[in-house]
Amino acid sequence: MPKLAASLAQAPAESITAASGGWSEVIAACRFLNNGDFEAGELIRPHRRMILDRSRGSDCVLAIQDTTELDYTPMRSVTDLGPLNDETRRGVHMHGHYVVSEQGLPLGMLGADIMIRDDEDFRQSANRRNLPIEEKESHRWIEGYRRACELACDLPDTMVISVSDREGDIFELYLEWLNREVTHRAEWVVRANQDRVLTDVDEDAPARLFDALRAAPLLGEIEFDVAAKKGTKKVKGSRIKTRRAARTVRQEIRAMEITPRPPQRKGLKLPELRFRAVEPIEVGLEFEFNQDIAQLATSPQSRDLRKNPHPTTHSSISLASDITMQQPS
C-alpha cells in the first residue's frame, strides 16, 4: 500500500496505468482496489493516530467538514451510482473531515463518508421534511461534529473547533454542543444560512438575525492580503473564466450574542440555546463593471450592485459557540 500510495501521489492527475511503474504494478494496484476484505475505517485509523501526534502541543486545531461530488457520469460502465444535482449526472458524494492547524498546516484526514442517493427518493424534499434528523442527508454534519468532539476528548489541552459551511447551519447541531459536557465537546463555527428569528431582542430592535447583526456593536477592524487568482465558475450550466486581482482587504467586525427561536419539529419541542453571531464586512471596496464580472449582468443581484457600489452580503455571517472573542487590534 505505501508503494501504491507513493506512485499515485507523484502523479495525481494520471490514470493508474500511467502512474504505475509497469504492468505488474498496475495488476497489483487493481487487485488492491478490488479487495473487499477491509473497511474504509481501517484506512483512516492510521491517519487519525498521526493527527493526534501532530496536534499535541497545539493551542488550537480546526476540524473542517464539507461535502464534494465525485462525478462518474462519463464512465458508463460504472454501476451502483446515484444522482448528483440532477438525474443526468451520476456519482457519489464524499463528506470529508480535514484537520488543519491555526496557521493552515494540514494535519490529516479525520474521516470520509461516502453517500449514494436513491433515485426513488431524489427530489422528494417535501417528504423528507417530516423525517427525523437521523434519516436526513443533513445528519452528516452532526456526525462530523461528533467526530470533532471525539478528537477534542483525545486532545484535552487543545481547543478543537469544528468548521462547517452553510449546509451545516442546523439547529440540532447546536443542541449536540449544548447537551455535551464542556470537557467532552468541540467548539464550532458555522457559516450562517438561515435568517433566524431572535427571541431576546428589544421591542424596537430588528427581530431577525441578518438585520440585527448589521446593527450590532463594531468590535474593530482587521486587514489582510488576498493573492491574485484565476479560475472558472459555473453559471447556468456553463463555465466562465473568473479573475481575482491581488489586493489588501479591510473588514469591519460586528458580533453579538443571540437566542434564536427553535424550529418546529414534528413531535418534538426543541429547547432554546444561546450562542454568538459574527459578521466581517469588507469596507472601501469599489466594483468595476467590466468583462471580468460580466456574468453579474445576468443575475438578479446586478441591479442592486449598480445602485450600491459598496455591497455586502449576509453569506459572510458565521455562527459560533463559546469561543473566546478577542477585540481586533
Image (cartoon, rainbow, N blue to C red):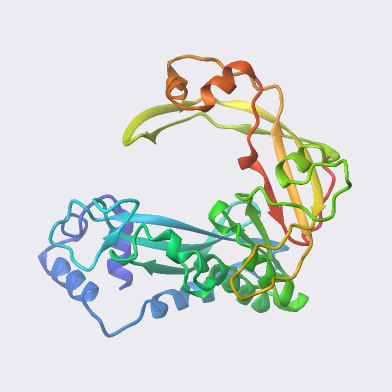
Which image quarter holds the C terminus?
Answer: top right
Residue 24, given in percent of the width and then of the height, sits at: 12, 69
Looking at the image, which residue is at 37% across and 76% down?
A: 40
Closer-to-camera residue (83/48): 83
**Figure check: 271 above or below 252:** below
**Figure check: 251 above or below 180:** above
**Does residue 183 appear to the left or right of 227 in the view shown?**
right
Which image quarter holds the N terminus?
Answer: bottom left
Residue 12, given in percent of the width and then of the height, sits at: 30, 53
Q: Is residue 186 visible?
A: no
Closer-to-camera residue (262/66): 262
**Does residue 202 appear to the left or right of 33 in the view shown?**
right
**Does residue 225 appear to the left or right of 159 in the view shown?**
left
Looking at the image, which residue is at 33% across and 66% down?
A: 116
Q: Is residue 90 visible?
A: yes
**Does residue 199 appear to the left or right of 176 in the view shown?**
right
Closer-to-camera residue (208/70): 208
Point out the residue furthest to the bottom here. 37
Q: Quadrant of residue 284?
A: top right
**Figure check: 23 above or below 239:** below
Q: Quadrant of residue 168?
A: bottom right
Residue 223, given in percent of the width and then of the height, sits at: 72, 33
Looking at the image, which residue is at 59% across and 52% down?
A: 104
**Figure check: 5 above or below 215:** below
Residue 7, given in percent of the width and then of the height, sits at: 28, 61
**Across the whole image, how many numbered discs are drawn on residues?**
0
